[in-house]
């Protein structure tokens, strides 16, 4: 096995406590430097550090080793925050400009100011940094060579920081297993003031309060685990935290003031038994803490909503069988949160889809003051605030990858008294919003978009909306729903006429909430000024998610798969109709109506498929299902032609081009057209395909492997969690050989 090559020459650590000692020990054990040297005031500490293997040797001052140091050497300053200035003074007097200087202080503004005072301006060799790791233990005996594994280190380079020195420090931290991030000095101190310095101040104050003021000798004897976990950090080094509080005074005071204000409101709510306020605080806090836990575990919530990229590696061949239930319908899940929030009373939801898109909607309404309990295994309880009860969010609403959220919510926000802003991830930022902004402006809304009519959307509150009679330029359930939701706040009767049928979940659900919606042919209408009343909603399994497995069973010889409780809304069954036209063996049973939505169990058995001219009247009924249907077409005998589907070019990706490119890589003859595609069925090979951050592209090429002759690697399948968080689990359960790998 090849020995690791050193990435630096000498590492000199000034201050051999937990932080500095752990860096020295970690680099030394991994062979990352030629020599580690500790600089300590007390000789006994130096002797102990050498004996423990933390450093190779120790000395009493930086001047003693300065003449040995040059290019490729690093000095790491690891002393209490307010002592950094003294070390910088020594460094100025004895170190060559070629030596890299970095630090681990928790406050970067004070170090920047100290460097300016000592050097005149911060020298290019200085790289300000802060490892976000530690424990309540301190001293060289606590040094842990693995302390920085899977922890973050924040570097705050200044305008004149030399790139070579910055790169060296980055490499050093990565070598000991850390994830390196960069941000400005000001942002660092604000963020750490709130997330690290404030909690320590509270923990110290709480323990001091209990120890000094309550006076009950049993107060600690009977303290439970929650007290132990919360106050653990009060065992940290008092001198270090004394310095941090002084060095980052402004940020800590700002955070403390906010906390005291909120604590005062909480006290008032407890005193007055304000149940709604208490439940709101606790549900929001639980959701935020769960999100934090997911980030630490590198799971997704939600903030593109994911933290690391993954690929799918699929082995060729196989079949699918068994009985499964896919997650709840995404469209209905979105609408249950939106309408439940503006209803009066409590709405209880069963079967809610706990995917990133629907969770983005849920979080948006929490940010606007709605108390929402859950989700807990698909159960959600929404304490509605009424049509006019939403509150101004404290910050822009981030909706991740969810086009449904941003488009439908824009209709609701157009009728509010407060200003609002919505943004999303990289994929959403490319999607056109003019299709909702234009009709809303016709109703009197004031909306600004980024260049090209793209997110973020900024909506000015306090406008008087008037009803319109709006013919949709193209069939779109999102645009139709947006206009109808704005119509709830408009004066008069709003009418939307669509050129072809689209999903009607909004109209059905509004009716379920007791709001009158009239439908006549292609037109839906409602009159503003009514009210919604809380109700119970059972979300059926999502036919869009079921589609991937319906196609999988249709194309893989020997397959026999049943999908239970699938929503078969008449405006969503295009995929069933198209597969049947292609010759699929697909039967429905146990048909029933649940909460106003028709559902059924769907059994699919393998049958040879044939290419068809897809009827244009089916296109709006299957718009989200076409990526998977393109896989069916690639496995069919003959030619499949799709027209009238130009909307596919403005989804999470240009789905026509993305699918054509991927199919061509797999050896399939797929020719895109402006409004569709022509696919000639035939043999399918393997290869690497790009998803363009689109969850449906990723899942479609995953099922393609069932008919491939070689492995398929699906690049960047991270966003599958947006709509189908259990896709991988169900794929393996039904017989698809799928491996998730870090990309």
Image (cartoon, rainbow, N blue to C red):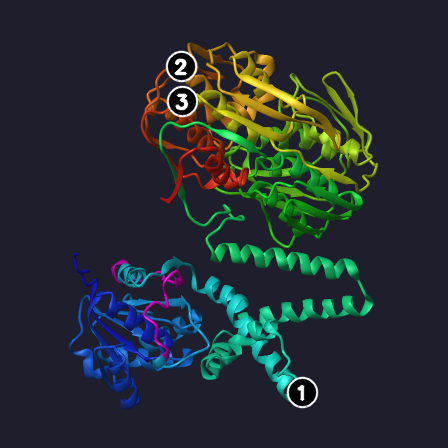
Q: Residue at x 48, y 33 (%)?
A: 734
Quote the CA–CA distance across marks 1 and 2.
79 Å
Q: Residues within 10 Å of mark 2 (few under 14, many from 20)?
A: many
Vertical side of 728 occupied by 500: above or below:
above
Say if residue 620 shows up in the picture. Answer: no
Q: Which residue position is annotated with label 1?
A: 213
Quote the CA–CA distance across marks 3 and 2.
13 Å
Residue 470, image x and y in percent? 71, 23
Q: Residue at x 58, y 68 (%)?
A: 255
Helix, strand or loop at mark 3: helix
Instruction: Answer left or right for 320 relative to 205.
Output: left
Q: Which residues are magenta?
A: 142-165
Q: Which residue position is annotated with label 3?
A: 660
| In magenta segment, residue 157 | yes
- Of tags 1 and 2, the one toward the viewer is 2
Depth check, front residue: 451 or 249: 249
Vertical side of 587 occupied by 173: above or below:
below
Q: Residues within 10 Å of mark 1 (few under 14, many from 20)?
A: few
């Amino acid at each position: 096995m090849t020995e690791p090559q050193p990435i630096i020459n000498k590492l000199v650590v000034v201050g051999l406590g937990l932080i500095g000692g752990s860096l020295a020990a970690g680099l030394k054990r991994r062979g990352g430097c030629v020599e580690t040297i500790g600089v300590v005031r007390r000789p006994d500490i130096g002797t102990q550090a050498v004996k423990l293997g933390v450093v190779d040797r120790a000395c009493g001052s930086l001047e003693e080793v300065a003449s040995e140091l040059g290019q490729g050497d690093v000095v790491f300053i690891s002393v209490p925050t307010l002592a950094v200035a003294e070390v910088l003074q020594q460094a100025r007097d004895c170190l060559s400009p070629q030596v890299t200087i970095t630090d681990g202080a928790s406050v970067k503004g004070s170090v920047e100011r100290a460097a300016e005072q000592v050097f005149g301006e911060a020298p290019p060799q200085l790289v300000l940094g802060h490892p976000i790791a530690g424990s309540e233990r301190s001293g060289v005996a606590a040094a842990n060579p693995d302390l920085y594994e899977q922890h973050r280190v924040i570097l705050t380079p200044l305008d004149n920081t030399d790139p070579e020195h910055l790169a060296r420090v980055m490499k050093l931290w990565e070598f000991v297993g850390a994830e390196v991030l960069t941000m400005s000095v000001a942002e660092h101190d604000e963020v750490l003031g709130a997330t690290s310095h404030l909690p320590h101040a509270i923990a110290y104050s709480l323990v001091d309060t209990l120890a000094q003021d309550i006076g009950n000798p049993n107060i600690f004897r009977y303290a439970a685990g929650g007290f132990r976990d919360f106050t653990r950090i009060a065992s940290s080094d008092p001198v270090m935290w004394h310095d941090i509080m002084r060095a980052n005074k402004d940020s800590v005071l700002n955070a403390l003031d906010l906390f005291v204000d909120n604590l005062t409101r909480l006290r008032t709510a407890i005193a007055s038994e304000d149940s709604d306020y208490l439940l709101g605080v606790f549900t929001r806090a639980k959701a935020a803490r769960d999100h934090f836990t997911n980030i630490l575990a590198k799971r997704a919530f939600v903030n593109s909503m994911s933290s690391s990229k993954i690929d799918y590696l699929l082995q060729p061949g196989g079949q699918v069988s068994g009985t499964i239930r896919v997650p709840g319908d995404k469209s209905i899940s979105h609408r249950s949160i939106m309408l439940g929030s503006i209803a009066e009373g409590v709405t209880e939801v069963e079967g809610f889809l706990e995917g990133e898109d629907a969770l983005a909607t849920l979080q948006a309404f929490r940010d606007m003051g709605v108390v929402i309990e859950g989700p807990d295994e698909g159960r959600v309880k929404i304490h509605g605030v009424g049509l006019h009860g939403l509150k101004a969010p404290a910050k822009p609403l981030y909706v991740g990858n969810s086009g449904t959220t941003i488009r439908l919510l824009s209709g609701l926000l157009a009728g509010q008294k407060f200003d609002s802003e919505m943004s999303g991830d990289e994929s959403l930022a490319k999607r056109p919003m003019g299709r909702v902004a234009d009709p809303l402006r016709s109703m009197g809304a004031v909306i600004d978009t980024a260049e090209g009519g793209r997110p973020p959307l900024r909506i000015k509150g306090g406008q008087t909306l008037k009803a319109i009679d709006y013919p949709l330029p193209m069939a779109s359930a999102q645009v139709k729903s947006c206009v109808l939701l704005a119509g709830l706040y408009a004066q008069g009767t709003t009418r939307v006429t669509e050129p072809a049928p689209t999903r009607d979940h909004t109209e059905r659900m509004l009716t379920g909430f007791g709001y009158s919606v009239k439908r006549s042919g292609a037109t839906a209408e409602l009159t503003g000024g009514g009210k919604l009343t809380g109700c119970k909603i059972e979300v059926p399994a999502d036919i869009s998610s079921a589609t991937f497995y319906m196609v999988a069973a249709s194309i893989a010889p020997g397959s026999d798969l049943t999908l239970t409780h699938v929503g078969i809304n008449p405006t969503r069954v295009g995929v069933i109709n198209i597969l049947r036209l292609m010759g699929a063996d697909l039967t429905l049973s146990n048909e029933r109506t649940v909460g106003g939505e028709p559902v059924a169990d769907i059994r699919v058995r393998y049958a040879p498929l044939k290419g068809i001219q897809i009827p244009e009247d089916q296109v709006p009924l299957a718009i989200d299902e076409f990526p998977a249907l393109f896989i069916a077409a690639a496995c069919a005998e003959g030619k499949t032609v799709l027209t009238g589907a130009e909307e596919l070019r403005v989804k999470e990706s240009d789905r026509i081009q993305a699918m054509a490119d991927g199919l061509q890589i797999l050896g399939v003859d797929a020719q895109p057209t402006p409004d569709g595609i022509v696919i000639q069925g035939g043999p399918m090979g393997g290869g690497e395909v790009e998803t363009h951050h689109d969850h449906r592209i990723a899942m479609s090429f995953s099922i393609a492997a069932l008919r491939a002759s070689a492995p398929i690697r699906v690049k960047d399948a991270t966003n599958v969690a947006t709509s189908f968080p259990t896709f991988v689990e169900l794929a393996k359960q039904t017989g698809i050989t799928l491996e998730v790998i870090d990309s």
